[in-house]
Amino acid sequence: VRAGIRETAASILLENVEIEFRTYPRLGQGEVEAFESALRNKVDGIITFPSRPEILGPCIRRASRARIPVVCVATDAPHSGRLGIVAVDTLASGSIAADVMGRFIGRREGSIAITLFDMAITEHAEKYAAFENTLRSFYPQLHLLKPIEDHGVEKEAYSKCRKLFEKCSNLAGVYVTTEASIPVLKAARDAKVLERLTVITTDLFPELVPQIRSGAVAATIYQRPRAQGEMAFRMLHEFLAEGLSRSHQVALAPHLVMRGNLDFFLQRQSQESAQEKAEQLRENTSGL
């Protein structure tokens, strides 16, 4: 089985499987071309992150007509004919972030900022809606500002956030729905407002660890990217190789990571990395 899958999907070592990674400059730029290249190559299946579902949808429908199953990860392309979707529950993510934000801020009034890649992305729009609904229901004293769309560009994230931080004197918190949290934190630090902000971020990576330890980041919503990739791959493999039809919609529960449980998640990440390296070594050795 040959599957054209995006680079973020975890690779699972299985016999008689060839994986082709097709990358592109950034979300929203080059993904259609990468997808069409996979179709021309007549791959057996595709795993993709549809950042622009309204644009990628017709491509997925073409794949479906050609009997090439497509599994979406992280965000969905509804009504596209895709085989399935594996993602973290975005409604849970947004609600948890809002509840943690409100509890950290307490009863004081203030404005809340939210940054995302683009409201056109299903995942980000759903997070925003869940965050907004939870704030309105339980923390009405907090006012959610218009979302900041950074389009995955660090300079844009820094610039837009820096302007907001200098302009909004009653800003109490920031929710970063993507991995682009470092430029947001830098902008807050440069504007000398970081100490008075409650910052909730997304995912867990090395640059973010010291920010959590220092308290600059109150919590991060870990979206379990490895689990998403593995489950998407297995869904596709079971459909192609074994004729099994797994649940077409898998919503994983997000994990809330704070200073108290940070080391637990870092240890688990290290164990998973070591296990993957051992599997790759065994695979390489068996081919000698």
Image: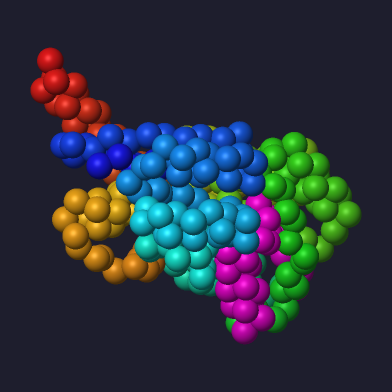
Q: Residue 81 appears at what percent x and percent y?
A: 45, 66
Q: Residue at x 36, y 42 (%)?
A: 43
Q: Residue at x 85, y 48 (%)?
A: 163
In front of the other: 233 or 181: 233
In front of the other: 59 or 272: 59
User: Per the image, is 112 magenta?
Assistant: yes
Range covered by the magenta-colored residues: 109-137
Query: For this view, does 248 lie left or right of residue 23?
Result: left
Q: Residue 13 appears at what percent x and percent y?
A: 21, 37
Q: Residue at x 52, y 43 (%)?
A: 36
Q: Residue 120 appears at what percent x and percent y?
A: 66, 61
User: Per the image, is 22 magenta?
Assistant: no
Q: Quadrant of residue 185?
A: top right
The quadrant of the picture occupied by the N terminus is top left
Query: For this view, does 136 lie left or right of residue 18?
Result: right
Q: Is residue 228 visible?
A: no
Q: How many numbered marks have been drawn onto this rendered protein structure?
A: 0
